[in-house]
Amino acid sequence: MSTEPRRLLVVYTGGTLGMQLTERGWEPGADLAGWLADLMAEHCATVDWELVSLEPLIDSSNAGPDDWQRIVDAVVQHRESHQAFVVLHGTDTLGFSAAATHFALAGQGLPVVLTGAQRSFVVDDSDAPGNVLGAIRCALDERFCQVAVYFDQALLAGHHATKISSTDDHAFDSVNLPPLAVLTDDDELIFTEQPELGVDRPLVAEPKPYWRSDLVVLTLHPGLTAERLAAQLTPPPQAVVLRAYGTGNAPDNDPALLAALSRASEAGTVVVVTTQCPHGAVELGHYAVSQGLLATGAVAGGDFTTDGLVAGLTFLLSQDMAPEQIRSLLRERISGAETEKV
Ligand code: ASN
């Protein structure tokens, strides 16, 4: 491992962190470059760094697979000249972008940290300085070499981080995986789980760029009619993330409901089951009631979040794989993910 200090690239995509208040509400446009230059001069004077802005700057509610790819491209294009990457991003969809960046860069050993803020740097009590400096601290640490999210003094694996509060400084949690590290008030970075080689084993050898696929997230709720579910599956999408109950349960007392899912699977839709619970994994077949769902051809999403599955499925669909190929890769790498972290 090189002992040379890492050269840092900051990739700015937008988000509250650099927003200003306009007549329409908060939107990108504050002088982020000027603020960051002052912050770096005050706290990181010895760091060799560069800023790249991905124009147009966006509220992350507008982010999609094209934007994920722009982040990945920015990192890949600078991987010879820079050794550490911090991505400044809106928090609303940061969990999706972090997972997408993880899948695209898995196995490359690149230290990439996504962060954002709940309040713009223009506000007195902004959480932007702490998050940005913490993210930089992590990205420059020679022990760190994967895609992660830094927020509120914690470093979280990129494919398990999800937004849990629209207002609190503690806006992100790592679901079903302990934080990778915590940053103490004394600026000590304590790794709780060493980033081991193989932890982020790539799903495919040479990933193709992200493109916008026809994927839908569906949530079960008591009283959902088979007609409504069937309408949501017409025409059959390429993939469904099905937010079921508990360990992956769905009602088995309405054959028409399960028939709608079976028809979609037979038509080539990849159905992946996750749980509506904030924590815990899916295990199809654990309860008898889930046998019906299992029989539709649905695949368990393991301990992945909705964010992780949307990004992961979009990644696999972008590889031009046949539905059965995607299902078997999911079964092999995702369904039992609580025992093997991908
Ligand atoms: N709407 C903002 C965004 O995601 C929220 C934030 O960054 N805190 O861009």
Image (cartoon, rainbow, N blue to C red):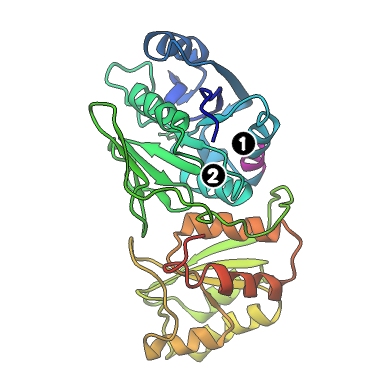
Span shown in magenta: 66-71
The verdict on residue 68 being magenta is: yes
Q: Circle 2 sits on which residue?
A: 97
Amino acid type at circle 1 is Ile
Nearer to us in this view, 200 or 25: 200
Residue 92 appears in the picture as rendered: no
Dividing the image into four quarters, tell me where ligand 1 lies. top left
Q: What mark, if any, has residue 71 been given in the picture?
A: 1
Against 202, is 108 above or below? above
Within the magenta stretch, is there residue 175?
no
Magenta stretch: helix, strand or loop mostly: helix
Secondary structure at badge 2 equals: helix
**Residue placed at 69% from the left, 60% from the top?**
317
Query: Which residue is at a point 57% across and 43% down the rendered structure image?
Result: 109
Question: Left or right: where does residue 235 sit relative to residue 158?
Answer: right
Q: Quadrant of the N terminus?
A: top right
For label 2, being within 8 Å of ligand 1 is answered: no
Quick check: 180 left or right of 317? left
Sequence order check, earlier mark of 2 and 1: 1
Please, what is the three-letter code of the amino acid marked with disc 2?
Answer: Ser
Looking at the image, which is closer to me, 41 or 304? 41
Q: Label 2 to label 1, Cα distance in Å? A: 9 Å
- Answer with left or right where residue 52 lies relative to residue 89: right
Question: Within 10 Å of the Cα at label 1, are there few (<14), some (14-19), or many (20+) other Cα atoms?
Answer: many
Mark 2–mark 1 CB contact (< 8 Å): yes
In the displayed structure, would residue 170 be above or below residue 134? below
Residue at left offset 66%, top offset 67%: 237
In this view of the protein, which residue sits in the foreground, 154 or 258?
154
